[in-house]
């Protein structure tokens, strides 16, 4: 195992051991505190541009299996672990994390004091990082000079529509960085799903005679997307029930006059208590967010706040006052993380059925 | 044999959705009064009011009504006044949401109209029910339905609410 | 709900220690008592365990020293009139008593509430039918089983559930009659020979032997908010009791999908039972398909919940106490050092904790060493590390009591025996697994033989690679660095390289390399808090700093074995409490997950580390304690520590080996407190041996010794003084006597008062002698305390040791003191 370095924008350098691809990489460094589900995390399109630090020290134990993909193409820029296991103990296949990362050209670095790194990342606001062979001045210069793309959604979204057939409701799923968990949950509910590109217009949606629309999670800032997306949302919510999540949620908020901002420290984990306002109940959800809806900007004659994160106070859910459309910041499908929020899909379909009566 | 058709989670979800739909249809909660039909309708009404309050930060009046004396198909057994709360509230110019657990023939709702007419003249009345089981005998239709459950006439629907039954559930009892 | 109604509660204690009940319940009761006090609630407790810290810390007037049974509990309820009763920290006995009190309507009659467990949950404990109903109602799977009346019906069931199955007669609990049948022939044969007049019905149940064993610990508040505290992976498959398995947290070999299924199942069960507090569930997972079953529901505090609290750093008992008083998770106010969000954050770990059981076979060689579904271990140790290997090796090092920090070799086992042990697990499981890898067994074969996930064999392989490195590259910095990262101790390297441990330490110290200590907390570094519980690693960031200029380090006993171990743990806890009262900052080092001495309220800082010289020195170098206390009898360790002249080390009680005992019978003793200036007589004590008045078989004590007449006593005291003056003993000293057949007494020996008897002396005299010893050794002893001695000798205290023979399926009458597992305390009036 070759020695490699993780270098940070703040000038810190860590010595570690290479695994996965041996390419050089640069991205925004974030911390994920889920204890399991590294495969789901690495394959989540939301991590386009990002290097993921795992707080759980032992990564790779179960290998890679076909049930845990959140996308087939993975866009994470790199992963940082305390230790990785080069084996596969799941009973579905023999692919190891190391091989998988090599296949997808994603470098990993092991042997890092990830707890110290976590503390550092939480102290600083967002930082760029690189995994490199040499930690010299040149490497730092390159890191500092690098500019990360803001065209992530365009890069990860499907270019053409495709179906995932079922016998139930006809649901249009707008792909901003499709997470397969959404497809799985809709399949469990027997929906007929048509996945559409990020820049689909309201007319294109309505032409398919949908029962409901879902806006998927996705990478990057909602403000990097053009106004046309917000128009699509405004026009669609008036006509049919809509359910948005993650980036979709942020766009839904923007479309209804609210503002979003970049979090000082991104939150990726499933340990935060989230209060459902209407029932006062506290639930746990799979969260992976770099942006949030500003509660002060919410127009109360248009939107209701439905979920709040009790740790950092961020808005975790909103609902339109006049239309049966709602959104959540977290990933209601889990993957990885709790199933406490899965029934939001049923709630959405109840909205759909209620509208169809 | 009994079969649970709505469990605790599903019941909560249904009430949550009804609450949102009330806000949607009513354009907020101004002028709203919620009428719960005794017995379980009252608890459902209170829960909906409670949810509305959490969202809107505004107290919503809940009135319970007993319709047995207005029913033409049931022997009068209760001598309860129609408004058990004591403080009679005027429904003049109010937006009324009438809440019951199960919508069946529609006769309960018809009696409720009679009870309401004694309390004033609301601007409008909307009906919310947890379960719509079909078999209407009158031209009545709910505006907010928790769940549609097709049933045979011989089946019994048992709604249980935590406040008095120690659990939330809807069961079909097959005779 | 009843926040304001409850002013006084009765905790049902856990009684004498036994297999499956060490000190974790006492620790929980103690923490609960502290939390209740914060809420302005008075605690009463009934228990007859002399080594219970809770009994000591609850005001004497509120303790009831009685055997815990229905009659005595009822008596206490009537006399003390508590508002509520807490059965969750008293083990199954307390649950059964409470079930009985509930069923008989007594609680209603006396207007006593049950808190900590819902009625539904209470009724489910040990009622397998009810448990099945609860599981079915929750739409979760329980192990399929059916009652059959004849062979044809039995095969009907088999066609549904498939082999292997377990068949057992319905009308007897005799486990010997159970049979695992793997195929048609076995089943036919069994049934042919089993259906008869006594056995007309049989239960056919799917066998889950070989399934993966997973445990989940969750909590729920009155409002229905639920948190999964911890998941525990048993390394051994179903078939070995989870208390006898190596246990790993967090779970390592499940995918997130599998894990979330179990989390959701746990929550559904907790919701169904309306748990308010803690619940522990056990699952059996198929390794071939998606099947899993719920095998056990424990809505109470046990070793798995204690382990979970220790592993996560989550303040479990404190939180649950508040929950049972009706508070919601987001309303709980923790002690200041915690972040206010801690109770409501679902724990996420950035370390690995591994538990290894300790078995009693060394002291009870007659017992069958075969591990099965009945628990046999009497203690355990944990290792905490940043990797599985590190945690595993630290746990293993902690579980070995060799003072030289070496692992026993299994190389003498022949191959047949080795394979036999792989298939049929016995004690020292891990060492057998290591030996099999050393002999080159293939991982896939080992997985097949042992039903242990191959992940763990890869980890063990890695450890052996490091061991090779240590052997082949001695005294190199690179070797030491690698070894440290994988949990090897300095002592192990010193042993391998045949050099003093100090030499090893010099090699890396000269490069300024020292261990880094990391906090055991539940937010994976997210929340800022000052949780004072640490484990070592060799990494970048250290989080533990010198506590104070006046620190006392207390070195705990490690995992419980038979002998005075639970007493030693109580003793350790008491030493910590007393040192704190004397103004010291206290630091404790221990590795027993069930230890009462590790309760966070008792010390200022806790290190969960192997009790080995290198690890101790690391902590000493960081904390620079002004005093080091070593409760218990640790000859080798003391000898090593004494080499470090600058250390102010005190072993308590002083080393037993140096006592002077003549080879004579013994029947009573006199106990003294000896200072440099004076000898104080404290009490006489009757020593009752269960075999030939032999000192090793003295397991039954009475205080004072009622049959001794005053003249003889005075004479004995005089004689004792001469022996004391001849020796250089100080502190608590015991003079042994024998009463000869002619009525005369003879001197038998002198020794420091043992741990167990020191505690007994405290109970009998009402003076906390551990406190006095600590005062004495810190030069604060005031002889005025002697004046407080109760001269009223009407009350006789008796302490009787208990043994684990019955639990180990043995019939032994004469247990010796090294086979003790606990003790019962009793008071009676002198007749």
Image: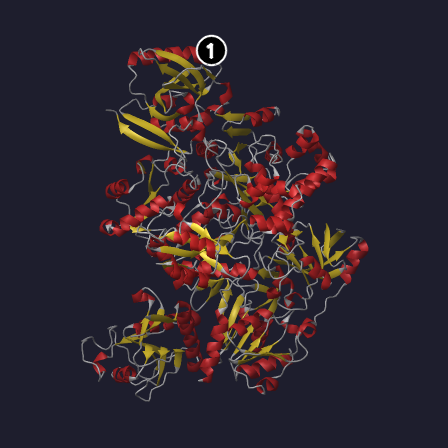
Farthest bottom residue in view: B139
- Element under disc 1: helix
The quadrant holding residue A10 is: bottom right
Q: Is residue C218 visible?
A: no
Q: Position of residue C566 (x, y in %)?
A: 44, 34
Q: Give the answer, above or below, for where A334 lies relative to A189.
A: above
Q: Give the answer, above or below, for where C586 lies relative to C285.
A: above
Specify whether A19 is left or right of B144: right
Specify whether A79 is left or right of C636: right
The quarter of the image holding the C terminus of chain C is: top left
Which of C33 and C299 lies nearest the eye of the viewer? C299
Q: Position of residue C542 (x, y in %)?
A: 63, 43
Q: Is residue C775 visible?
A: yes
Q: Which residue is mark 1?
A: C726
User: The numbered mark 1 sits on a residue in which chain?
Assistant: C
The quadrant holding residue A171 is: bottom right
Which of B107 and A303 lies nearest the eye of the viewer? B107
Q: Position of residue C136 (x, y in %)?
A: 40, 62
Specify whether C10 is left or right of C271: left
Specify whether A156 is left or right of C728: right
């Amino acid at each position: 195992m070759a020695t490699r370095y993780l270098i940070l924008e703040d000038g810190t350098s860590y010595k570690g051991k290479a695994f996965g691809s041996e390419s050089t990489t640069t991205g925004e460094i974030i911390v994920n505190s889920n204890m399991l589900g590294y495969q789901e995390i690495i394959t989540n399109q939301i991590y386009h541009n990002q290097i993921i630090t795992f707080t759980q020290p032992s990564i790779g134990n179960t290998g890679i299996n076909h049930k845990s993909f959140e996308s087939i193409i993975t866009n994470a820029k790199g992963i940082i672990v305390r230790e990785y296991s080069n084996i596969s103990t799941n009973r579905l296949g023999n692919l190891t994390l190391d091989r998988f990362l090599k296949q997808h050209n994603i470098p990993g670095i092991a042997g890092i004091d990830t707890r110290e790194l976590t503390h550092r990342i939480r102290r600083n606001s967002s930082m760029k990082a690189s995994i490199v062979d040499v930690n010299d001045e040149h490497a730092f210069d390159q890191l500092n000079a690098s500019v990360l793309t803001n065209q992530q959604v365009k890069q990860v979204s499907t270019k053409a529509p495709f179906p995932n057939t079922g016998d139930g409701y006809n649901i249009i799923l707008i792909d901003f960085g499709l997470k397969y968990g959404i497809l799985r949950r809709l399949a469990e509910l027997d929906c007929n799903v048509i996945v559409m590109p990020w820049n689909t217009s309201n007319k294109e949606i309505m032409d398919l005679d949908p029962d409901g629309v879902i806006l998927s999670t996705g990478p990057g800032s909602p403000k990097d997307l053009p106004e046309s997306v917000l128009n699509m949302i405004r026009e669609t919510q008036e006509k049919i029930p809509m359910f948005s999540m993650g980036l979709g949620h942020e766009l839904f908020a923007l479309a209804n006059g609210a503002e979003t901002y970049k979090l000082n420290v991104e939150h990726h984990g499933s340990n935060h208590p989230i209060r459902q306002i209407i029932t006062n109940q506290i639930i746990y959800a799979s969260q992976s967010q770099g942006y949030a809806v500003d509660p002060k900007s919410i127009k109360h004659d248009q939107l209701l706040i439905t979920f709040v994160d009790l740790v950092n106070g961020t808005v975790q859910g909103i609902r339109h006052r006049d239309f049966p459309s709602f959104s959540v910041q977290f990933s209601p499908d889990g993957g990885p993380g709790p199933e406490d929020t899965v029934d939001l899909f049923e709630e959405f379909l109840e909205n759909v059925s209620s509208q169809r009566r | 044999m009994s079969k649970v058709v709505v469990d605790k989670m599903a019941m909560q979800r249904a009430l949550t959705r009804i609450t949102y739909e009330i806000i949607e249809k009513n354009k907020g909660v101004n002028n709203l009064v919620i009428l719960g039909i005794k017995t379980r309708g009252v608890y459902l009404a209170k829960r909906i009011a409670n949810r509305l309050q959490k969202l809107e930060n505004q107290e919503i009046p809940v009135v319970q009504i007993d319709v047995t004396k207005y029913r033409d198909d049931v022997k009068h057994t209760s001598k309860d006044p129609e408004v058990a709360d004591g403080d009679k509230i005027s429904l003049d110019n109010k937006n009324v949401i009438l809440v019951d657990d199960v919508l069946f023939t529609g006769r309960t709702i018809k009696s409720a109209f009679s009870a309401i007419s004694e309390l004033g003249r609301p601007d409008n009345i909307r009906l919310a029910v947890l379960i719509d089981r079909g078999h209407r005998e009158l031209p009545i239709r709910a505006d907010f339905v928790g769940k549609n459950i097709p049933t045979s006439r011989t089946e019994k629907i048992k709604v249980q609410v935590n406040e008095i039954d120690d659990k939330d559930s809807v069961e079909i009892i097959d005779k | 709900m009843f926040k304001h109604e409850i002013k006084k509660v009765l905790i049902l204690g856990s009684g004498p220690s036994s297999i499956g009940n060490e000190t974790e319940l006492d620790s929980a009761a103690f923490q609960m008592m502290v939390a209740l006090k914060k809420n302005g609630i008075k605690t009463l407790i009934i228990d007859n365990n002399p080594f219970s810290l809770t009994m000591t810390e609850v005001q004497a007037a509120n303790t009831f020293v009685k055997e815990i049974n229905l009659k005595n509990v009822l008596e206490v309820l009537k006399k003390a009139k508590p508002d509520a009763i807490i059965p969750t920290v008293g083990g199954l006995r307390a649950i059964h008593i409470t079930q009985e009190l509930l069923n008989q309507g007594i609680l209603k009659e006396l207007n006593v509430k049950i808190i900590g467990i819902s009625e539904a949950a209470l009724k489910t404990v040990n009622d397998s039918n009810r448990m099945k109903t609860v599981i079915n109602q929750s739409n979760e799977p329980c192990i399929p089983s059916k009652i059959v009346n004849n062979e044809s019906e039995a095969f009907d069931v088999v066609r549904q559930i498939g082999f292997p199955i377990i068949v057992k007669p319905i009308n007897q609990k005799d486990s010997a009659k159970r049979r695992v049948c793997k195929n048609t022939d076995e089943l036919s044969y069994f049934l042919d020979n089993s259906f008869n007049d006594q056995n007309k019905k049989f239960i056919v149940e799917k066998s889950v032997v070989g399934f993966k064993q997973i445990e989940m610990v969750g909590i729920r508040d009155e409002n229905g908010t639920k948190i999964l505290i911890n998941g525990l992976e048993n390394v051994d498959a179903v078939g070995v009791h989870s208390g006898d398995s190596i246990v790993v947290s967090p779970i390592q070999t499940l995918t997130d999908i599998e894990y979330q299924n179990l989390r959701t199942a746990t929550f559904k069960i907790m919701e169904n039972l309306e748990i308010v507090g803690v619940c522990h569930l056990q699952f059996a997972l198929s390794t071939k398909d998606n099947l899993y079953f719920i095998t056990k529901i424990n809505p109470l505090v046990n070793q798995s919940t204690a382990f979970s609290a220790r592993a996560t750093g989550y303040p479990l008992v404190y939180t649950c106490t508040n929950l049972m008083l009706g508070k919601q998770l987001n309303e709980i106010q923790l002690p200041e050092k915690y972040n206010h969000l801690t109770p409501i954050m679902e724990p996420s770990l950035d370390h690995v904790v591994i538990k290894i059981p300790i078995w009693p076979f060394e002291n009870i060689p007659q017992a069958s060493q075969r591990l099965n579904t009945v628990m046999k271990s009497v203690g355990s140790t944990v290792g905490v590390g940043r990797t599985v290997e590190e945690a595993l090796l630290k746990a293993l090092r902690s579980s070995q009591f060799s003072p030289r920090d070496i692992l026993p070799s299994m190389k003498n086992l022949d191959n047949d025996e080795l394979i036999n042990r792989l298939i049929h697990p016995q004690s020292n499981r891990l060492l057998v697994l290591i030996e099999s890898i050393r002999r080159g067994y293939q991982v896939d074969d080992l997985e097949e033989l042992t039903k242990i996930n191959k992940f763990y064999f890869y980890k063990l392989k890695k450890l052996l690679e490091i061991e090779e490195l240590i052997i082949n590259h001695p005294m190199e910095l690179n070797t030491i660095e690698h070894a440290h990262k994988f949990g090897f101790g300095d002592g192990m390297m010193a042993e391998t390289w045949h050099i003093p441990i100090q030499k090893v330490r010099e090699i890396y110290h000269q490069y300024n390399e020292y261990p880094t200590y990391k906090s055991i907390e539940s937010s994976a570094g997210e929340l800022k808090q000052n949780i004072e519980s640490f484990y070592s690693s060799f990494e970048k960031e250290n989080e533990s700093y010198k506590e104070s200029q006046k620190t006392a380090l207390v070195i705990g006993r490690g995992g419980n074995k038979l002998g005075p171990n639970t007493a030693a743990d109580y003793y350790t806890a008491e030493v910590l409490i007393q040192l704190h009262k004397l103004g010291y900052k206290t630091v404790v080092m221990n590795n027993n997950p069930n230890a009462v001495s590790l309760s966070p309220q008792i010390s200022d800082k806790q290190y969960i580390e192997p009790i080995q010289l290198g690890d101790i020195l690391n902590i000493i170098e960081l904390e620079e304690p002004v005093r080091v206390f070593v409760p218990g009898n640790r000859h080798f360790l003391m000898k090593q520590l004494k080499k470090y002249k600058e250390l102010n080390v005190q072993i308590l009680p002083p080393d037993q080996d140096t006592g002077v005992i003549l080879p004579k019978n013994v029947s009573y003793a006199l106990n003294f407190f000896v200072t440099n200036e004076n000898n104080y007589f404290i009490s006489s004590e009757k020593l009752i041996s269960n075999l030939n008045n032999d000192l090793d078989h003295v397991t039954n004590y009475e205080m004072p010794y009622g049959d001794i007449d005053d003249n003889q006593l005075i004479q004995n005291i005089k004689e004792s003084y001469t022996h004391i003056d001849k020796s250089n003993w100080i502190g608590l000293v015991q003079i042994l006597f024998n009463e000869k057949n002619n009525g005369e007494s003879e001197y038998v020996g002198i020794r420091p008062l043992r741990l167990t008897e020191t505690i007994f002396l405290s109970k009998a005299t009402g003076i906390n002698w551990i406190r006095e010893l600590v005062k004495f050794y810190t030069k604060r002893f005031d002889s005025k305390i002697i004046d407080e001695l109760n001269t009223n000798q009407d009350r006789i205290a008796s302490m009787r040791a208990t043994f684990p023979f019955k639990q180990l399926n043995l019939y032994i009458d004469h247990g010796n003191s090294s086979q003790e597992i606990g003790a019962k305390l009793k008071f009676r009036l002198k007749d």
